[in-house]
Amino acid sequence: MKKLDIFKKLRTSGLRPTKQRVEIAKFLFDREKTFHFTVESLEKHLTKKTNFKFALATIYNTVHAFKKAGHLNAVDVRGKKTYFDTNITNHHHFYDDETSELIDIDASEVVIQKIPRAPNGKKIKNIEVFINLKN
Amino acid sequence: MKKLDIFKKLRTSGLRPTKQRVEIAKFLFDREKTFHFTVESLEKHLTKKTNFKFALATIYNTVHAFKKAGHLNAVDVRGKKTYFDTNITNHHHFYDDETSELIDIDASEVVIQKIPRAPNGKKIKNIEVFINLKN
DNA sequence: TTTCTAGTTTATAATAATTCTAAAGTAAAA
DNA sequence: TTTTACTTTAGAATTATTATAAACTAGAAA
């Protein structure tokens, strides 16, 4: 991902490119494979990688701005922490309860043959499939 | 649901039938349709319906014992609170983000034609489908 | 029955994740 | 440059949940 694209992510999220935000955006978006994180894990990675300090509030704010702009997705997983996903394409997840690990499943790997129609005046926004794992 | 069944739910959860627990079990299981609740909403319903007082800790403990015994399911939903479901059969959900409302979908209403196989040494425990709604 | 014991309820404290706040700092417009 | 509006930050506040310990109670034992 080019440097310009990082700035574009920030700009389209309504965020000025400050030092912290640029590092967060680089860390999240400058990679081949998508990945999953919590605010806590992101903070650890960032401080380790950059030697700067990141207030948790800054990370929360930035991540939420990215989510609002559609550059990140939140994933609903059992437990207290919120997981985020840099994969914003329509896709699904394996979830391993024992390790709390999420694994992406490409949308093409899941074919749904039949679903009920949405209730009274509602429309279907999207479909999420969770395949829970055990050993 | 017969009174005996309420006591059976408690017994099979390893819980003595105390006043509070009997009321909780009656409220949860003595109904035609399954329903969804949080600990907070359950507390409100119980105090309104019975005029007793229920410490939150009692509700947490009881609900978790029911879950552990398989009489309740936890549902992963966006947001901080944990939702529970008295429907313990294999099934799916509509979720309405705007109203935070969950609606059951019978397992037979969803047919999945293709899923990927589980990763390295893992097995599939179950599959949950969430159909997110919009207006 | 009454007594005793282990399990229970309760209020409150502790914890954990997240959000808020207000002061000090910084990017970018003027 | 100077100014202004937006940011970062540390720490306080909030929210959901879990832990604690003292008072209470169901059910076994006498």
Image: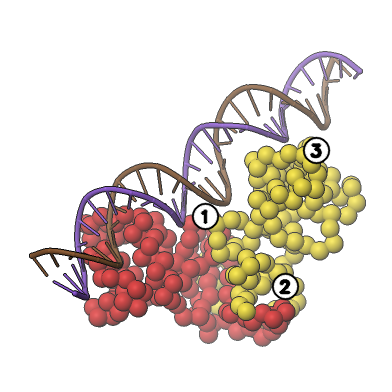
Chain colours: A red, B yellow, C purple, D brown
Kindly identify which residue carries mark 1. Answer: A80
Residue depicted at x 69% and y 81%: A121
Q: Badge 2, how many Cα within 10 Å: few under 14, some, many 20+?
A: some
SS at mark 2 in the image: strand
What kind of residue is marked 3?
Answer: Lys
Position above or below: C5 against B131: above
The answer for which chain carries disc 1 is A
SS at mark 1 in the image: loop
Does the image show residue B120?
no
In the image, are marks 3 and 2 on the same chain? yes
What kind of residue is marked 1?
Answer: Lys
Q: Badge 3, how many Cα within 10 Å: few under 14, some, many 20+?
A: few
Of circles 3 and 2, which is in front?
Answer: 3
x and y, in percent, of residue B28 in the image: 78, 53
The answer for which chain carries disc 3 is B
Residue depicted at x 51% and y 67%: A75
Kindly identify which residue carries mark 3. Answer: B19
Kindly identify which residue carries mark 2. Answer: B105
Write down the quadrant of residue D28 in the picture: top right
Position above or below: B64 against D22: below
Choose between B86 and A71: the one closer to the eye.
A71
Mark drawn on residue B34: none
In the image, are marks 3 and 1 on the same chain? no
User: What separation in Å lies between label 3 and label 2 (alpha carbons)?
Assistant: 33 Å
